Image (cartoon, rainbow, N blue to C red):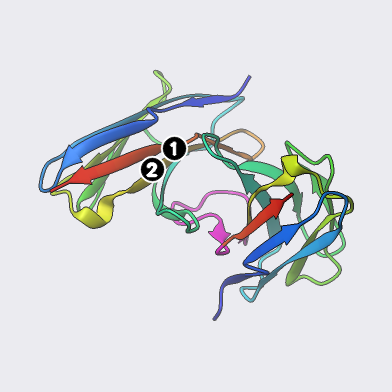
Amino acid sequence: GQNIDQPTEMTATEGAIVQINCTYQTSGFNGLFWYQQHAGEAPTFLSYNVLDGLEEKGRFSSFLSRSKGYSYLLLKELQMKDSASYLCVAMDSNYQLIWGAGTKLIIKP
Amino acid sequence: NAGVTQTPKFRVLKTGQSMTLLCAQDMNHEYMYWYRQDPGMGLRLIHYSVGEGTTAKGEVPDGYNVSRLKKQNFLLGLESAAPSQTSVYFCASSLSPEPTGQETQYFGPGTRLLVL
């Protein structure tokens, strides 16, 4: 079956770095997305990886290893506004999105 | 551009009542989707549409019907609401299902539905 695993909750300190891991199993693979979702709001797009390696976008970076079915989202210089849920999403061979349950990130001052 | 809009934002229903959720997009997107999001679970696809006049079932279609009479609108209907349908419903649209490296699906703000 198709499955996404990511931690339910993580806590980090303002100004620090946090890495949110995700493993996935899909029927075929057309890329891995990360979305941010603040409480009560819609998901917003953060990143997309389809090739192995690291993609950097400002304070956020995303890594993909296709052979391991593994991705992580790295957030640097954490700010209070980064408190949100982070959703790992894989796209299968039929271009359907398989959504993880999300990792709730709590930032403490 | 308003992007993707959803109506209503919040609704309370009694068991057995019916209602229709409206999703509208002004980006001329071919593809539209309805998802539900429940606590502790990822978004689950209810129904989707690959163009005007077409609809298809997603992962959790039971208890819902959809229609896409106009390209810009995608309606989600609940004929006889049940407490299990209490959820947050998100509509999304995309130009194509294929990823472009940028945002693939654009989401509406969500509709919070409570069925008593």
Residue A65 visible somewhere in the drawing: no
**Residue at which label 1 appears:** A102
Asked whether disc 2 touches disc 1, contact meaning CB atoms under 8 Å apart, the reply is yes
* Residue A57 x, y percent position in the rendering: 25, 52
**Which amino acid does the dot numbered 2 rest on?**
Tyr
In the image, B35 versus B38, the foreground residue is B38
- Both on one chain, marks 2 and 1? yes
| Residue A63 as seen in the image, left or right of residue A27 | left
Badge 2: chain ID: A
Q: What numbered label is drawn on residue A86?
A: 2
Report crowding for label 1: few under 14, some 14 to 19, many 20 or more residues within 10 A (C-alpha). Answer: many
- Label 1, secondary structure: give it: loop
* Residue A81 x, y percent position in the rendering: 25, 57
Q: Quadrant of the N terminus of chain B?
A: bottom right
Part of the protein shown in magenta? B91-109
Instruction: Determine the residue positioned at 24% across, 34% down.
Output: A19
Residue lying farthest to the left in this orientation: A15
Badge 1: chain ID: A
